[in-house]
Image (tube, rainbow, N blue to C red):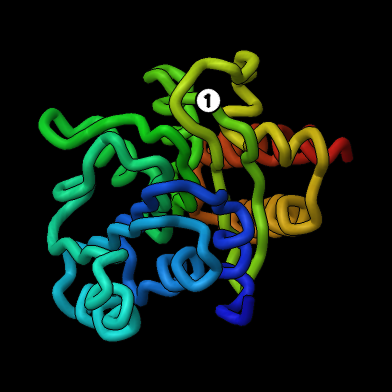
Amino acid sequence: MGYGKRIDTLCSLLQKVKVFADVGCDHGYCTEYMLKNGLCEKAIFSDVSKGSLAKAQALLAPYVESGVAQSVLGDGFFGVPDSVNEVLIAGMGGSEIVEILSHKTYGFMPERFVFQPMRDSEKLRRYILENGGFIEQDFTFRDGKFYDVICGGRGSSTAPYSEMEYEFGRDNLAKMPNAFVERTQRLIRDIDRYSSQPQLSDESREELAKRKRKLQEVLKI
């Protein structure tokens, strides 16, 4: 697709739908991908940043002029109808995505979604499964940095998650993708480095040791 591995990975998870929304669109590449490839009849792209939205508006100007794309300056789902068929939210924290989904005025669980939280993935997984959503894919990939991606939709077809699956992601534990293994190994090394600091309290050192044992259990080492 040529947008870079992170964007290409997100685009590969998007499905053909009638109406697509890219919330926090930044550059607008994913919306361009959907429209260019005939994967939606209409696209809504939004951002709370005027600067980011301006970049997307410039990229998507021909689609806006033809009436198949609509730009929205606003936070979260402001300007995005709950009848939209598929929503992409990428590059925000999991807590921020939860705030969007749970907003008392504009919040809703999308019919289908692709979420790429930058942190707090566990919190997002819990919210989805406890508030009318299901998860069909949930894994880590790497493009310089490590990223989690969670795909699913509105409904309740997901078998209950274990505590470990909430924390680490079901597909990661079942399939052990290279990116997930590499990130977990890096976390173990970080714990080793931090644990060697002499100023740490015994309580902090024990907490780190406990965390290391859990990560080793995940990797079965």
Give the residue type that dot 1 points to.
Phe
Query: Image point 30% across, 77% down: which residue?
Result: 56
132 with respect to 6 (left or right):
left
Find residue 16 and report its horizontal and vertical position in percent.
54, 51
Quarter of the picture containing the N terminus is bottom right
Q: Which residue is mark 1?
A: 134
Q: Position of residue 145 (x, y in %)?
A: 58, 68
In the image, 2 versus 218, the foreground residue is 2
Figure quadrant of the C terminus? top right
* Residue at x 52% of width, y 58% of height: 39
Whether residue 52 is visible: no
* Residue 158 % position (x, y): 60, 19
Residue 112 pos. (x, y %): 47, 37
Residue 60 lies left or right of residue 132; in this view the side is: left
Where residue 25 sits, quadrant-wise, is bottom left
Secondary-structure class at tag 1: strand
Question: Which residue is rendered at x = 18% and y = 70% of the image?
Answer: 49
Asked whether 55 or 197 is in front, the reply is: 55
Q: Height in image: 211 above or below 66?
A: above
